Image: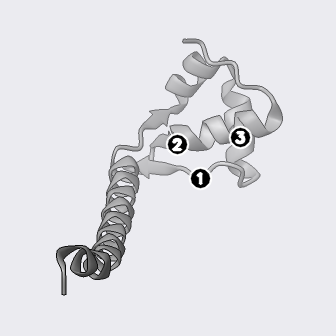
Amino acid sequence: MNADTELNQIAPKFFEALTGYIKNAVNEASKQAFANRQREESFLSINDIVKKYKISRATVYQWRVKGLLKYRTINGKKVFIKESDIVSLLDAKGQNNTAE
């Protein structure tokens, strides 16, 4: 068997293995990026939301009561909402008025 024939037999297997390796690496990197994004999600207080997005406290409260915004509390008092939830809701309503 000459070198060209051997190369022609090995090359497809090599590229198939390499393609599989790259797909797995990209998939793992995507999973890690998503996990990092979830960990780094920022939460805003009602005051922060009012200042940054120029909406009233009453509006934020109404959205919470209607179930449009999920929230978390600390010590049963301080309310925090994921910033991405605010942005999504404002985008859906066509009201994204970011003060930045």
Q: Which residue is mark 1?
A: 70
Number of on-image labels:
3
Q: Which residue is mark 3?
A: 89
Q: How is the image coloured?
A: one colour
Q: Position of residue 22 (x, y in %)?
A: 33, 63
Sequence order check, earlier mark of 1 and 3: 1
Of the 4 image quadrants, the one containing the C terminus is top right
How far apart are the two marked residues, 2 and 3, measured between alpha carbons?
Answer: 12 Å
Sequence order check, earlier mark of 1 and 2: 1
In this rendering, position of residue 46 left or right of residue 93: left
In this rendering, position of residue 14 left or right of residue 45: left
Q: Residue at x 66, y 41 (%)?
A: 88
How far apart are the two marked residues, 1 and 3, measured between alpha carbons?
Answer: 11 Å
Q: Residue at x 41, y 44 (%)?
A: 41
Q: Residue at x 63, y 21 (%)?
A: 53
Q: Quadrant of residue 60?
A: top right
**Seen from this angle, which residue lies furthest right?**
93
